[in-house]
Amino acid sequence: MVKIKVMKAISERNDEVAHEVRKYLAENGIKAVNLISSPGSGKTTLIEKTIEHFRGSLTVGVIVGDLFTALDAERMERAGARAFQLDTGGSCHLTAPMIKSALADFDISGIDLLFIENVGNLICPASWDIGESARVTLVSVTEGNDKVVKYRTAFYSADAVAITKLDLLPSCDFDVEKVAGDVKALNPSAQVFKLSAKTGEGMQEWYSFVQRIAG
Ligand code: MG
Ligand code: ZN
């Protein structure tokens, strides 16, 4: 059974708490990856595939931020991870105090890698440090060519960008190289992945990145 915690308004200062969360995770040997994207960009599926890939070699935990349901956390548990559902009570982004509060109730013993699936929203999640070790922003080929330039903060602040659902490219008017170039122009140090979780395209590069983060 997935544990669910419903958030109430928390007034602690975000950046101080983010620092505490980062320290707490480091003390417990856990690397956290914050995944940001619009709804439907494939965050849950990417995490699911990654859990399956590392089954038996990395212990993976997932904190899923969602507005009202536990559907994604249930998928993560079926894939073999320890999952915790953070019901944001309608809030459109995760904050460090929410993560701190989730960690107080979530058994993290033995976890090597913690995915934090942010609320599906390309705008405000980018402005909130939640104590992650790495931030990955996803954009799928179904979303159009302009997302990087329109939602700059989400791409500027990312350690890596994943262009997802490449298998749908034939039916989309999406220019992978243009979008990858937009990322490089905005954030030259970000690694860019071109992925299809469905066909497996690009996934080995992604897994290598995840393995490097996990250490
Ligand atoms: Mg999801
Ligand atoms: Zn928000």
Image (cartoon, rainbow, N blue to C red):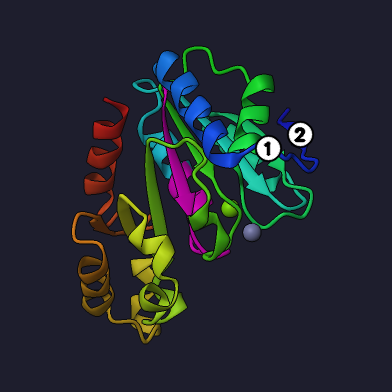
- Helix, strand or loop under label 2: strand
118 magenta-colored: no
For marks 1 and 2, give the CA distance: 6 Å
| Picture quadrant of residue 53 | top left
Q: Specify the quadrant that holds the C terminus.
A: top left
From where the camera sits, is residue 199 visible? no
x, y (%) of residue 4? 75, 34
**Residue shown at the point (39%, 82%) measured from the top left:** 146
x, y (%) of residue 169? 34, 77
In this orientation, which residue lies closer to the viewer: 209 or 182? 182
x, y (%) of residue 22? 45, 28
Ligand 2 shows up in the quarter that is bottom right
Residue for badge 1: 85
Number of numbered markers: 2
Q: Is the CB of the residue bearing disc 2 within 8 angstroms of ligand 1?
A: no
Residue for badge 2: 5
Q: Specify the quadrant that holds the N terminus.
A: top right
**Residue shown at the point (54%, 33%) measured from the top left:** 16
Q: Which amino acid does label 1 sit on?
A: Gln
Q: Earlier in the sequence, mark 1 or mark 2?
A: 2
In this orientation, which residue lies closer to the viewer: 210 or 50? 210
- Helix, strand or loop under label 1: strand
